[in-house]
Amino acid sequence: MLAAPSAAEWAAILLSLRVALVATFAGLPFGLAIALILVRVRFPGRAVFDAIVHMPLVMPPVVVGYLLLLALGRRGPIGAFLEQTFGVVLAFRWTGAAVAGAIMGLPLMIRAMRLSLEAVDRRLEEAASTLGAGRLEVFLTVTAPLMLPGIIAGAVLMFARALGEFGATITFVGNIPGLTQTLPSAIYENLQVPGGDGAALRLTAIAIAIAFLALIGSEAIARRTTARVSGR
Amino acid sequence: MTLSVDIRSTPGDFSLDVRFDSNGPVTSLFGRSGSGKTTLINLIAGLGKPDRGRIAIDDTILLDTAAGIDLPPHRRRVGYVFQEARLFPHMSVRSNLFYGYRRVPEKERWADPTLIIDLLGVGPVLQRRPAGLSGGERQRVAIGRALLASPRLVLMDEPLASLDAGRKDEVLPYLERLRDEMKVPIVYVSHTVDEVVRLADTVVLIDGGQVIASGPVNDVFSRLDLRPYTGRFEASVILRARVINHDAVGRVTVLEHGGGELRVPALPHPTGTEVRVRVRARDVALAVGEIGNLSIRNRLAASVVEIGAPDGAIVEVRLDVAGDPLIARVTRDAVAALDLAPGRQVTALIKSTAIDNRSDD
């Protein structure tokens, strides 16, 4: 029953990994910036900003996908601008899947980063500044290393969320084999066709394996970085 | 070096209004907890913003609200040794020590890493992480880290307060060596008389956010009217004396002071060195006229300067011993019996065992 995956199945697996990795790395600077703003900057409308950032967590993924299509589709305001200015098209492309994954994963990433940033002892940052480090240097040498476990945890959550993203993705980029078909959409499609059970099961097993490895790997990294930053 | 501070600030419901000049080498900001000492040195370091004021080290203006000058902390080159060390937990001791050093322009680096690491005795722990250090080691590394940044001035905020008595005794001699061997001026915040008299030359007495008095340590601590701030039972002065002889048989060291010889329990210092010995007011007795045989060997010729206001049965008498102040705590009764009054010549008697240059009580 669990024969080797077909070429189309491999394509879905590799595309999913690529989408999840790109979503994670592209999302990191945004996640970090938003976490910093939410924790360190006091400004009017902060609560509203906080709520907007967390919306993807509570909205139906299909709604997010549809909103992405409206905004970033070829006839959407941002999508049209991107296409005319940079020649970039996101809708019905794998890059669009990465954008959908990043948007869905961002609230989780920000939550993890925020917690670790709040735990950073600001008195250490003060000490660094009296030793001649400017604000950026303080961030790079003290704040960021100390919140590293949170950054890694956030990245892992984002990766997992992007890997499993289905609703927003299928709404925004469709389910085109070899082009936008990710692991979850491939499983879904196989379940829709007669005799697709074997393939669905195979892909499910692979999805489980990837998730498991990611979890084990991130645990190991988290343990090592936590030990590093706490100095043991 | 002259540090001049003139600040008015009302952080929260606390009000700080402080003005002083200090010429170092070690200036102590002395006052009880909550008197505004830490708030004040945070302002000097640039970690807080005063409402109005001016802070300058020689010609370098760190802050001048009237002129719109406010250097950020990393441009002030003011070293800060915090009460709780604040070492970076994710770095080795070595990386901690060199954190500031690496950030100073080469031509402004006066600190010699080898010398400072050796002076503080932190060489053996360079590879360790802060979490693996004892409290005393941690504080020594923090002091080294601040010094290696080659600051214009070092602020120390009760660096011994978080240590137990044993660790205090471990770190204090390092501070004394720093004072004697480094040229850098130090502002030392403390509420412990003992540390202040051992380390500082000048003291600025602060209470309720105001400067109550400032001047040479002995002058301020021997002023009887300041007793409510400097502590009743802690009353003591420091005599500077020179080691002239070691008596190996009697296990005593003989010190020379303008007012006479002092015999104290053996000290490790070589002959010729100047030492500071602390004499507590409660250990000084007074005699008038010829003294017979007494076990008390230290007899200093003194004259009465001032008789303090009586506190119950006790009166503090301020003396002058060859230019150095000395305080004696005696009974009211004794003042009357000896007919003590300003100008009267007396002999100050100090038990040898009461004199020490250690910090424990």
Image: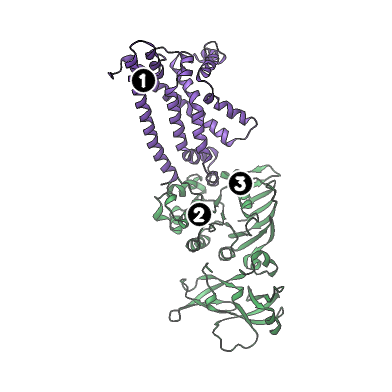
- Badge nearest the viewer, 1 or 3: 1
Q: Which residue is the site of mark 1?
A: A13
Under circle 1, the secondary element is: helix
Residue B327 lies in quadrant:
bottom right
**Percent position of residue B101, x then y:** 48, 47
Image position, residue A33 (x, y; %)? 53, 31
Along the line of sight, which residue is nearer the eye, A201 or B60? Answer: A201
A14 left or right, relative to B180: left
Give the image location of residue B6, x and y in percent. Answer: 69, 52
Question: Which residue in the protein does label 3 denote?
Answer: B46
Circle 2/circle 1 CB separation < 8 Å: no
**B306 vs A232: above or below:** below
Instruction: Say above or below: B334 vs B308.
Output: below
Residue labelled with disc 2:
B143
Q: Amino acid at mark 2?
A: Ile
Q: Nearer the viewer, residue A27 or B294?
A: A27
Q: Position of residue A16 (x, y in %)?
A: 40, 21
* Res B24 seen here: no
Q: As shown in the figure, which amino acid type bears the numbered disc 1? A: Ile
Tell me whether marks 2 and 1 sit on the same chain. Answer: no
- The chain that hosts pointer 3 is B
Chain ID for purple: A
Q: Residue type at mark 3?
A: Gly
Q: Colour of chain B?
A: green
Name the subunit of mark 1. A
